[in-house]
Image (cartoon, rainbow, N blue to C red):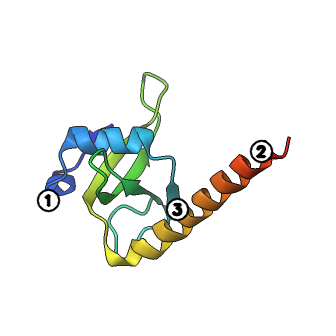
Amino acid sequence: MSWTHASRRHGIARHAARFFVEHCGLVYIQQAPPDSAVPDPRLVYLGDDEAGQPIEVIGVEMEVGANGEGHLRVIHAMALREKYRGQLWTINESRDRRSTEFALGDLTR
């Protein structure tokens, strides 16, 4: 994982963003804005950090290097913006529903 200077602009520490990305489990693929200097799709990670605060981390998959592995270049990290709240709420509600259905299913066996 590597970082752009802009990824620290909103006060999310690198260690917090790294932990979040490694444990997030919810990633959207978003096309680059038309005016972006980097045309690669973005990976948008949404969820709660270790302290339970909703955040967003956005990165770009970098090409495979000499070691045979690619890596994520984090370009943005901040408290969750309104534009992503609906997506996060929908996923959390779906996850809660599946957990309830799984638990109820266990009771009937």
Classify 43 as above or below 72.
below
Q: Residue at x 27, y 58 (%)?
A: 76
Classify 51 as above or below 56.
above
Q: Which is closer to the viewer, label 1 or label 3?
A: 3
Q: Which mark is residue 96?
A: none
Q: SS class of the residue under badge 1?
A: loop
> Mark 1 or mark 3, which has the lower sequence index?
1
Residue of label 2 = 107
How many numbered dots are placed on residues in this image? 3
Q: Residue 9 carries which label?
A: 1
Q: Residues within 10 Å of mark 1 (few under 14, many from 20)?
A: few
Residue of label 3 = 92
Q: Which residue of the protein is positioned furthest toward the top in this rendering?
A: 67
Q: Position of residue 32 (x, y in %)?
A: 43, 68
Q: Which residue is drawn at 45% across and 35% down?
A: 70
Q: In which quarter of the image is residue 96?
A: bottom right
Residue nearest the viewer, comparing 29 with 45: 45
Residue nearest the viewer, comparing 39 with 13: 13
Q: Which residue is drawn at 52% across and 62% down?
A: 92
Left or right: 93 with respect to 64? right
Q: What residue type is labelled 1?
A: Arg
